[in-house]
Structure formats: C-alpha cells, structure tokens
Amino acid sequence: MSDQYSAEGIQKAIRIHGAEDIRLEDIPSPKIENPDDAIVKVLLAGLCGSDLHIYRGREGNFSSPFVMGHELYGEIVALGPSFGADNGSTGRPKGYSQYKVGMKVFATFSVSCLECEACSLGQTSRCTESLLFGSPSLSGAQAQFVRIPKAGGTLIEAPVDENTGHEIAPSIGILLADILPTGYFAAKQALEHPNLVPLLHPKLISAGIGFIDPAYASEVSASSTDSVAGLTFAVIGLGPVGVCALVALIDRLILQLNKTSTNFNIMAIDLLESRRVDAMNSIRRLKDDRIRIGSLSSKGNPGVYISFLAPADVPSDTCVGVLEVVGHPSSLSLAATMSKPFGVISSVGVHSFPNFPIPPPVLYNKNLSFAFGRCPVRALLPAARSLLARRYSAFEMFVEKTIGFSAENDVKEAYVRYNRGEGGKICFDPWR
C-alpha cells in the first residue's frame, strides 16, 4: 500500500464494530469535504484511556463501525481552499495563512474553530463546531490518514525543543494532543478554585480575593495552615493521564513553595501496584531535591512529598484537593471520602455511568465543590508546553510500546493489554 496520499486511495485503519470488537481494515482514504479541512498523514497515533470507554461498550450504541483514536502526530498532505494568504484568511486563525503541505503537526483531540464565542472565552472543548475524533461523528486518528475539520484552529505545528532547536520527539510531543493538557487542567481546576485561595494565597484575603471577607479575616487569631503538617492533595488513577496530572500538580506546588513555607503532601493512588511503581519512576526522573518520595515527617524540610498508595490504604477527611482521573463512580466516592470540609474535587475522567454516586447529604455536610468536564486543550496548550519544557524528563520513557499495522493480532492485543491496565502508554505507527 502506497504511503502517498490519494483522495481515491485505500488506507489501513483501526475500526470498532462493537464492544471489544476491534479490527484492522482497509477502508477508503478521507477526502477534503469542506474548505477549512486538512488531510494529515498519521505518523503516530495514541491509544488513550478514553478509547477504552468505547471499547468496553460504555459509550452507547452506534449503527456502523468507525475509526478509533483522538491523539495524533503527522504531516499535512492536503489543504482545503481556505488556506493560503491569498484565500481570504485575513482575520481568521493564523493557521489558515501559515499551514502548508509538508508541515509536521499535532491535532487537539476535538475540533476547535477558534472563531466562536466559546473559543473566544478559552472554552475550546465546547466549541460550537466541536466534534470528537474517534467517535461516530468524526473518524479517528488510528489510521494512515485523517481528515481534520476547522484545521486552521484544530492543528498545532509540532513544537521545537528550545534547548536543541530540533523538533520534540513525536512520542513526547503527542502528549500535547490530549493527556498532558488534560492533566494540567485537572490540577488547575483544583488549585485555582476559590475554596483553596485562603490556603494557598493567604495574603490575598486582605485584598478581598476568595470568599473570606477581609473584615472577618482581621478578627481571626488562629493560623489557617500548619507549615509543618502542610496541605494534602490526592491524584486518583495513575494511568498516563493520571501521571500527567500528578506531574502538573507537583510542578504547580513547587512553584507555590517559592511563595509560602507550607509543605505539601500528595497521595498518588491506583489499584494496580505496577502503575504505582511506573508513576513513582516517572517522578524520580524529575531530579528535583524539593520533590520527595514518601510521607512528610514532622521535621520535614519544605517540599512536595509524594506517597504511592492503594485505595484501601488512604485516610479519610485529609485532602483539600483531589484530582479524579479515572471516570468511575468508585473513584468519585473515594474522592469525597478523602476530602476535608470545603474540599475541591477536580474530575477529568470520562464518566459514562448515568448516576452520581455521592449522596447529596454528603456534599452538603462537607461543603464539597466539584469541577468536571472535558479539557479545553487548545486554550491550555501554551501552559502545557511550558510544563513539558520544565518537566521533560518525566516523560522521556512515557510511551512504552509502539505497535505497527502489519498484523491485526498485534493491534487487538494492544487494546486487550491496555484494557487490563498492563504497561504504560501505547502508540500506533500506521506505516510499520
């Protein structure tokens, strides 16, 4: 099969036909359908935990098979007529004037037009043109070629390593398509919540930031935070997205150490010991003496202390913020149990179960706050790129295995292993 794109050609792609029914098939190559479209030759495609919800049959019924996957790195091979400086691109997202055939790119996991009200507010995950790659509404990235709608906003030019001047390795750069911004979003939603302002930024209370009135604050003599005991956070789920969330949380708290003498504890939680060990190894690669593996002792030096625990071993009523990265009722229930009064639960796991598992009296009696939803990747890319540059070493061995399209059984086995939680991040090379 030729690696040259043809609108009339045939390509290999991974399609789902039903629960746990994945097939590697020959299907027609995509075509330009709208002026804002691009066609990208996929050089690397990710297998994400969100794909497993579809694989397990939890995302509802669909009438016909579709191509899976929403994480991709590739090369532009065709562009619609909207592209080019002379094609009416003035005043539109810069991609329409700058993107060219042959350019290496990543794509956000959902379409972002950068021209609607939601996009103007940074709420790109709720773009009015939003479609999710690898869903019944839009063919996915686990294929040799993929059509990108609203490509002037959805595509991102492959970033360059500031130190070497070379393009970032695709196996690391592909994290920017979804899981690294999503992990950052999980930490951001918790740390910037008004409930945590008095804890993380006590000096701002006098300026009226947060919901504590400055007049009230002046009447209180007790200290809000013990600088030795510190503040405790948790990350539930240590798959690839969970590790990204953990790295993002550590990074934000390290920056916070420069502003306060408070220590920070993080409980990193997963059912599987293998994932706890892999996550610990990723954190060890950060080589920062302010990051310490193990629980904070009573005489601990200022730093961020991380302990890796099974769900059965975590204490109740200890966390000011919990990042829930699994998308399962049991994880939400655990997050509520672990939270202190006025705790914040930031949930970025994809929830496909219809009922909320936490009784309203629990929410009321603990004054819990929740922040849910899909990450606005396109808006958070600058922050995610900066995080990647600062903490690059944590991700150097992140992709455990790259699977080719030469054998259908290899593709099927990749899904089976990932569904069991075995190993780390898996990617596909459609041309191998």
Image (spheres, grey):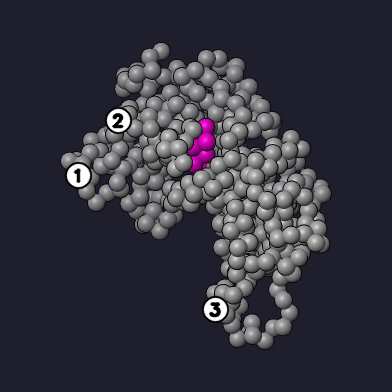
Secondary element type, mark 1: loop
CB contact under 8 Å: marks 3 and 2: no
Viewed as shown, does residue 333 lie left or right of 390? Answer: right
The N terminus lies in quadrant? top left
Q: Residue at x 52, y 32 (%)?
A: 171
The magenta stretch spans which residues? 171-178
> Alpha carbon of mark 1 to alpha carbon of mark 3: how far?
47 Å
x and y, in percent, of residue 176 in the image = 49, 41
- Pointer 2: what residue? 101
Q: Amino acid at mark 1?
A: Gly
| In the image, residue 322 above or below residue 284 | below
In the rendered image, the residue lying farthest to the left is: 86
**Whether residue 238 is visible:** no
| In the image, residue 431 above or below residue 283 | above
Determine which quarter of the picture holds residue 335: bottom right
> Alpha carbon of mark 3 to alpha carbon of mark 2: how far?
52 Å
Determine which quarter of the picture holds residue 98: top left
- Pointer 3: what residue? 208
- Pointer 1: what residue? 88
x and y, in percent, of residue 428 in the image = 53, 25
**Mark with earlier residue (1, 3):** 1
Which numbered mark, 2 or 1, is in the foreground of this view?
A: 2
